Image (cartoon, grey):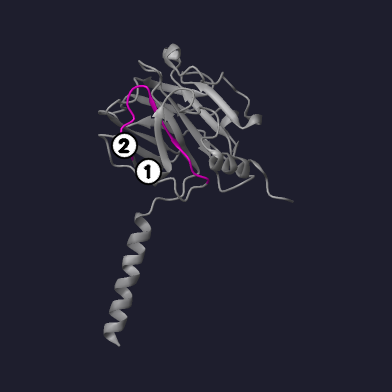
Amino acid sequence: MGRALWRASVLFVLFVVGFAQEPRLPRVVVQEFGQGRAGNGEWVELLVVGTGPGTTVDLRGWVLRDLQGQGRGGVWLRFTEHELWQAIPAGTLIVIYNVEDRPNLPEHFPKDDFDPSDFLLVLPARTGDYFVLAQWGGLGNTGDCILLIDAQGSDVFGLCYGERSGQPLQLGAVDRGRASWYLGAGLEGIFDPKNWRVGLDAPGGSTPGAPNSEENARWLEFLRTPPSA
């Protein structure tokens, strides 16, 4: 009887530890990013997931950053307290780009869009109404990590690529002129690198501001459709 109880206790502890090591389901994810054609023409695309269709996320005070080098790395920006960020609907794509090197963005990069009613925001990374930009020194070519942190300082989503590691999602090399994007239709497989692709940051490869695959398009449509009353 004692041995059975001991074994049950051990199994319970292992279950709890294993569960704690699983990444929490994020409310917002990085679902695509690109290095641009050259220089520092980088961009990052976020997808607001919320807790499902018809929900919103308050992004005020959130931080998007990389982990290149020391301190604040190469990229660090904070979402301001602007009312735009108070309730972003699930299914919204937020594309943030380096405005200081616009000529090196891919030629199919979308125009600026400040109206969330179409579930798309395309915003330059600069200090103003929407962001406080500490710096945009670029994403590393040989490796880097991209991290999204909420207003309470908790990590929401993180990925690494190339020579850098330490986040729930580990991708291969995404160097100059390349991009990486998520192909899936839900959060279940987003931390599996098999569900990501790396290709050219150019037409026929990356898809900034648009779905990344047919499955991905169905997920966006699902998130954008409120539950029936």
Q: Is residue 175 magenta?
A: yes
- The x and y percentages for residue 114 are 60, 23
Q: Quadrant of residue 166?
A: top left
Query: Which quadrant of the figure has residue 39?
Result: top left
Instruction: Name the amino acid, label 1.
Output: Pro
- In which quadrant of the rendered view does residue 30 lie? top left
Write down the region rendered in magenta: 171-185
Question: Is 48 left, or right, of 3 in this rendering?
Answer: right
Q: Residues within 10 Å of mark 1 (few under 14, many from 20)?
A: few
Q: Closer to the camera, 142 or 138?
A: 142
Say which label, 2 or 1, has the lower sequence index. 2
Determine contact: label 2, label 1, CB under 8 Å: yes
Check disc 2 and report the residue beneath it. Answer: 172
Horizontal and vertical percent for residue 138? 35, 21
Image quadrant where one finds the N terminus: bottom left
Residue 193 is labelled as 1
Q: Residues within 10 Å of mark 2 (few under 14, many from 20)?
A: some
Question: Does 68 appear above or below 24?
Answer: above
Q: Give the residue drawn at x 38%, y 30%.
A: 65
Q: Secondary structure at mark 2?
A: loop
Magenta includes 79? Answer: no
